[in-house]
Amino acid sequence: MHLLLFIGYSLLIIYGLLKIPFVRDCGIRPVFVLLFFALHAATGILHNWIAFRYYPGHGDPWQFYQLSFMYRTRLLSDFSRFMEDNSTLTYITHNGIIGVNMLLNIFSRDNLDINTLLFSFPVFLGNIALFRVFRRRFPDAAAAALTVFLLPSTLFWTVCIHREGVLYMLLGLLTWAFDRWLVSPRLHRRSLYCCLLSLLLILFFRFYIVLSLLPALVIWLLLEKPSLTRRLLTPVAAIAALTILLLVFAPGLSGRLAQAITARQLEFSQLEGNSRLPLPRWTAPGPAFLGSSPQPSAMASSNHLPGSGGKPLYLAFSVELVTIWCLIIISLLWRRKHPSAPQPFLAFCLFFSLSGLLVIGAMVPFAGAIVRYRSFFLPFLLAPALWWLKTFPIIRRLDDLVENHILNSNHSY
């Protein structure tokens, strides 16, 4: 029965990918759209298998799946207990993915592989949205756009039923909608509502992502609209000055955010895990908070060296990260010889990814969690480097290969 359901849902998804205009007009040949989705779904199922065999307790995806049965029983036969499990916003946020499994179980008849297939479809639509933004904002850099689908750690950690998949989907939809709104605010007014909804959902699933995302969006907006920048220069400067004054002279008002970060780091420090890394503790919020924060260790932790964490899987993703940083260094050197025009979206990508890595490195002491948490930041870090290297001989040939064989001219971005 489950095999028939899997085949039936696969055929429905294939039909949808070929017929939905949003996907059909993205600029990728239909056969490669299907191949990318097949890779996406197959990696999700592979992730479940690896987690079941090698992760302690079979990993989070299996735990959320198994808990969904308990929560369903309580929902149907012990509603007061179910409400106790969701009595606070923290509980509701942590149980969000369990709720996703509960919903998918209705259609899959309680099969995790089918759940993963169904979950892959909306997440893949978010990937398509981000691909369209990368294609539009990084012209003549086809390889940069394909990082959305093919970057190994991003693919591996966003295909299973977990927060990273939801967040990656929401980031794709948000950047696509924000880009459309910037192009024509009057024509695409509804896109702004999509941005706000995506932002609220990101805040729901993982609040500290907004710490990197909101300033990055503001930077993108101000660089994209110089006239708006001039009009907002005075109020933005006033807000920045007020923020600094609050941080220095009113720690009682400004300390809530710092307390949230400190509390989150404390939650991680109390957990047990085999991939723990040394991480200095944040002190109590106040004027000394900024001075006591572990700035050097933050980036070091989020970009842990090969071999740290103690597992071969983490070693592979560390090598991937080292490769990305090597490409970034090469791209900076290449850009000095071959300057390119300023790109507001590039500034958004770099600020969002680098600040996000710093926040993760400041809070998370486990290599495994760091690898997973940073996964959806990496395309925003690698794509700018590949765009700067688009005239580099090897990258140029790679871009030509992608343009000629994977992409087509039928696109609207």
Image (spheres, grey):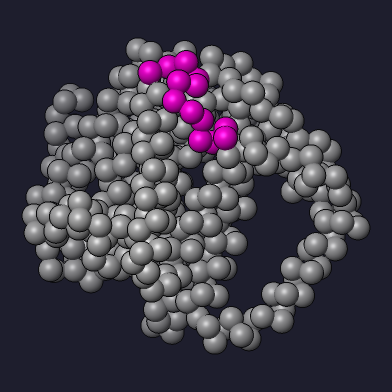
Residue at 80 percent across and 44 percent down: it is 291
Q: Residue pushed farthest front?
A: 337
- Residue 140 image offset from top left, x and y in percent: 23, 66
Q: Quadrant of the N terminus?
A: top left
Q: Quadrant of the C terminus?
A: bottom left
- Residue 178 image offset from top left, x and y in percent: 44, 68
| Left or right: where 38 falls relative to 207 | left
Instruction: Indicate the quadrant where residue 93 lies.
Output: top right
Report the number of numbered marks.
Answer: 0
In the depicted structure, whether residue 73 falls above or below residue 179: above
Q: Is residue 344 visible?
A: yes
- Residue 334 image offset from top left, x and y in percent: 35, 58
Q: Main secondary structure of the magenta part?
A: loop
**Residue placed most toward the observer, 305 or 178:** 305
**Residue placed most toward the observer, 386 or 183:** 386
Magenta part of the chain: 300-312
Instruction: Indicate the quadrant where residue 18 lies.
Output: bottom left
Q: Is 22 covered by the magenta stretch?
A: no
